[in-house]
Every structure is written in structure tokens, then in C-alpha cells.
């Protein structure tokens, strides 16, 4: 996939860049409790500053729904951001109009201003053309560094890109390159792991993946629905029994498309979901009682996944293999993640994961740094896995 990056932007000296970032950071009592998202934006900001551009940062925070909500102001980010940058950051009380223009005019080359929450304007989420024009009037170029917001066609993520030369920022570029390596243009064979709670929330994703992957391993609660559809006894496990037909359709589709489906061949079963609960291993096909819940994949399934991953060149992963938040039902997720990360670290596997709880599961397994790429983009990552075009990314295509 080709998209414009800052390397295509020519000389930036003296120009103003309007940079869409994801600063939707966790905050408590007006203090930032995790500055990861601020750090993610630094390479783009530094690159623009070094090129002599003025940098106007545009972001949303929380859901003010088109109203000015003082508790959702971006102002508390000014200090932590300027500490990370080692340079002063100005603040503009509005992201368009007089305050924004004045703050930008006051900047020296390489100066940075943070504009107030773009969602204080209802026109943002409506992708209003006039509002997009007002944003565009602030700058000479637009840089989108917020992949996590790229699935939304809002004025700051999509509309404005039609009024200015538009480029992917450094973090957007890294994300798009990783996603392309995992699913767009991967080294084959490619294996997917899709786990998590429910089939119903991941239908589009499963349908897209069976058409693209060589192998797809299904785990977690959603595997129970597939096993149930095959007549395997799942006792009182979480499953969407009314989706058995859908599960059979997906299994059929996989067969037609030549994607090998890997379902669990054994499980860890317990009657209650609590830390250290009494559990036992069970082989698929054994009979279970109505109190039994399948809470994790068993050792034979893990061994099969380890073998399948070793035989692959690329892995794309969304969703845990069990109830990883409660030990010992994290065992399969942790073992498989550690194997994948070790191969990625050794350079024999491209391993990309993300979406929802996957980041906390991979964090829990301690593998985030060794994986090729872990996306924290949530909804945008899932929509991309579903094969959907992301409006904010489409607007950056070369
Ligand atoms: P998702 O957000 O769809 O990726 O689902 C993640 C959730 O699925 C986690 O909170 C897991 O605890 C849960 N989960 C995984 N496996 C199972 C299972 N066998 N039974 C119940 N919940 C599960």
C-alpha cells in the first residue's frame, strides 16, 4: 500500500503543520496517569521541529459531544508534553478561529502549540465541510499521526485532508507498514489467532481472515461456539449457541478458501472463574457436567499452535486464548505469546497483534517489546483486520 509520508513533503522550513495526534490519554484528577500516547507522537513532532516547521497539535479527548466541557480540556497535557519535548508548548483555547490563529502566529520556527479539544465542536464528528475548511486555514500541510482515530470520518481525521497536502506521520507510518507486513502483503505462510469472548463481535473479522490466511486458530470463548457447532460437549461454558449455523458457515468458507482452521483439541475446565480455582485438563469430545466451564486451551492445543506458528512466516493475533485475567487460565495465552515473541525476536517470524484486550494479554505475557508490532489502536485495528477501508488512511493514499 502506498501513502504519502513526511519524506514526500519537500521543504518544511517556515511552514505550519497541522498534526492530528491521539492524545486521548488516561487522566485522573486532572493528571495524566499514562503518557504512552504523548510519547508515540514525539518522533513526528521532533521531525517537524527539526525541519523548521511550526507544529499545531490537533486532538480529541473523551466524549464532550460537541459541547465545551471544562473537565475534558486538553490543557492538562501541556506540561507533561513540554517536559517530554524539552521545549515549551503553547495552548490555544479553541482549535479554530482567532485563538488558534493567534497562537500559531506567535510561534517561532520549530514552536509547538496544542489546540483545544476538537470535539468541543459538534461539526468535528459531523465531518462538516466548513469546519474542515476552518481547520485547514490554520496550516500549510496536514499530518495524520493518529491511526487509532482513522476508522472515523471526522473533520480532523478525514475532511481536513481534502483541503491541504496530507501526509502520514511517523507513528502512522510505522503502524501502516506493520499492518501491511501482517495482512496486506505478508510473507507466507500466514497464521492468524483469533480469540476472545464472542463470535458475534468478530464475525466480519473471521470472514475476512479465512479468505486471506493459510491457517486460522480460534481460541477463547468463541472457540466454544465452534466446538458446540461440531457437536463437542462444552458443558456450561460461555458460548453463543444460537450462532452455531454461523460458525458452520465460517468453517465451510474456510474449507472453500483453503484456510486450515485450528480449533482447540483440549481444554482447561473449572466450575468457577476465580484465581487458583480447582481446574482439570479435558480432551475435546469428553463429556462435561453442566457446571463445567472451559476457561483456557489445554497443553495439546498449545503444542499444536506452537508447531503451526513455527511453520509460519507471519502471525496476526487478536484476542486471548482463555480467561487470561484469572490465573491459571492465562497459561495458554502466555505460552503461545512467548513462543511467538521469541521467534519474532530471532527474526524468523513477523508477529503483529492488537485490538481490545489483546494488548493487555500480550503485556501480561511480557512480550510486547519482542513482538514485531503491537497495535494499541483498538477499533481502528479491528476494522482494518475486518478488511474495511479506513477513511483517515484512504485520505493519505499516494
Ligand atoms: P475480546 O474483547 O472479544 O477479545 O474478549 C476478551 C475476553 O474474552 C477476555 O476478557 C477473556 O477473559 C474472555 N475469554 C477468553 N476465553 C474465554 C472463555 N473460554 N470463557 C469466557 N471468557 C473468555
Image (tube, helix red, strand yellow):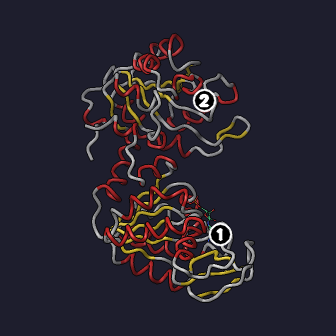
User: Alpha-carbon neighbours of circle 1 within 10 Å: few (<14), some, or many (≥20)?
Assistant: some
Dot 2 alpha-carbon crowd within 10 angstroms: few under 14, some 14 to 19, many 20 or more: many
Camera-side mark, 1 or 2: 1
Residue at image position (61%, 82%) is 233
- In the rendering, at what x and y percent does residue 161 appear? 36, 28
Whether residue 348 is visible, yes or no, is: no
Asked which secondary structure carries label 2, the reply is loop
Give the mark nearer the N terminus: 1 vs 2: 2
Helix, strand or loop at disc 1? loop
For disc 2, the marked residue is 74
Residue lying at 60% horizontally and 76% vertically, measured from the top left:
296
Quarter of image, res 32:
top right
- Above or below 259: residue 96: above
CA distance separating discs 1 and 2: 41 Å
Is ligand 1 closer than 8 angstroms to the Cβ of mark 1? Answer: yes
* Residue 396 x, y percent position in the rendering: 32, 36
Label 1 belongs to which residue? Answer: 238
In the displayed structure, 232 sits above or below 36; it is below
Image quarter where ligand 1 lies:
bottom right
| Residue 229, horizontal then vertical, whole percent | 53, 74
- Does the beta carbon at disc 2 come under 8 Å from ligand 1? no
- Residue 272 vertical position relative to residue 362 in the rendered view, above or below: below
**From this viewpoint, is residue 338 visible?**
yes
Instruction: State yes or no: discs 1 and 2 in contact (Cβ < 8 Å).
Output: no
Q: In this view, does 241 lie to the left or right of 19?
A: right
Closer-to-camera residue (309/208): 208
For image coordinates 44% across by 13% down, the residue present is 105
Quadrant including the C terminus: top left
Amino acid at each position: 500500500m502506498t501513502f504519502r509520508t513526511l519524506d514526500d513533503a519537500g521543504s518544511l522550513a517556515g511552514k505550519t503543520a497541522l498534526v492530528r495526534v491521539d492524545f486521548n490519554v488516561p487522566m485522573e484528577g486532572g493528571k495524566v496517569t499514562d503518557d504512552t500516547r504523548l510519547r508515540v507522537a514525539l518522533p513526528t513532532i521532533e521531525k517537524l521541529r527539526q525541519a523548521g516547521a511550526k507544529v499545531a497539535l490537533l486532538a480529541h479527548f473523551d466524549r464532550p459531544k460537541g459541547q465545551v466541557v471544562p473537565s475534558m480540556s486538553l490543557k492538562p497535557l501541556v506540561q507533561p508534553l513540554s517536559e517530554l519535548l524539552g521545549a515549551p508548548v503553547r495552548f490555544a483555547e479553541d482549535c479554530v478561529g482567532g485563538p488558534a490563529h493567534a497562537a500559531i502566529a506567535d510561534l517561532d520556527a520549530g514552536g509547538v502549540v496544542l489546540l483545544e479539544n476538537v470535539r468541543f465542536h459538534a461539526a468535528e464528528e459531523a465531518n462538516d465541510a466548513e469546519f474542515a475548511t476552518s481547520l485547514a486555514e490554520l496550516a500549510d500541510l496536514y499530518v495524520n499521526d493518529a491511526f487509532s482515530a482513522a476508522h472515523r470520518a471526522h473533520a480532523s481525521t478525514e475532511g481536513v485532508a481534502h483541503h491541504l497536502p496530507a501526509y502520514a506521520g511517523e507513528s502512522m507510518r510505522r503502524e501502516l507498514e506493520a499492518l501491511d507486513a501482517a495482512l496486506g502483503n505478508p510473507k507466507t505462510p500466514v497464521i492468524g489467532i483469533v480469540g476472545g469472548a464472542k463470535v458475534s463481535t468478530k464475525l466480519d473479522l473471521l470472514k475476512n481472515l479465512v479468505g486471506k490466511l493459510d491457517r486460522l486458530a480460534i481460541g477463547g470463548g468463541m472457540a466454544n461456539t465452534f466446538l458446540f457447532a461440531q457437536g463437542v460437549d462444552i458443558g456450561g461454558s460461555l458460548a453463543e449457541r444460537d450462532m452455531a449455523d454461523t460458525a458452520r458457515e465460517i468453517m465451510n468458507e474456510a474449507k472453500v478458501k483453503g484456510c486450515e482452521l485450528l480449533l482447540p483439541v483440549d481444554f482447561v475446565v473449572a466450575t468457577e472463574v476465580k484465581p487458583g480455582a480447582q481446574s482439570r485438563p479435558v480432551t475435546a469430545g469428553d463429556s462435561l457436567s453442566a457446571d463445567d466451564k472451559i476457561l483456557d486451551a489445554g497443553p495439546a492445543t498449545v503444542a499444536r499452535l506452537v508447531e503451526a506458528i513455527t511453520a509460519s512466516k507471519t502471525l496476526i493475533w487478536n484476542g486471548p486464548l482463555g480467561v487470561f485475567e484469572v490465573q491459571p487460565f492465562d497459561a495458554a495465552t502466555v505460552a503461545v505469546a512467548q513462543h511467538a515473541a521469541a521467534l519474532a525476536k530471532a527474526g524468523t517470524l513477523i508477529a503483529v497483534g492488537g485490538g481490545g484486550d489483546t494488548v493487555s494479554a500480550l503485556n501480561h505475557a511480557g512480550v510486547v517489546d519482542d513482538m514485531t508490532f503491537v497495535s494499541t489502536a483498538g477499533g481502528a485495528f479491528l476494522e482494518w483486520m475486518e478488511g474495511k477501508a479506513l477513511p483517515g488512511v484512504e485520505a493519505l493514499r499516494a
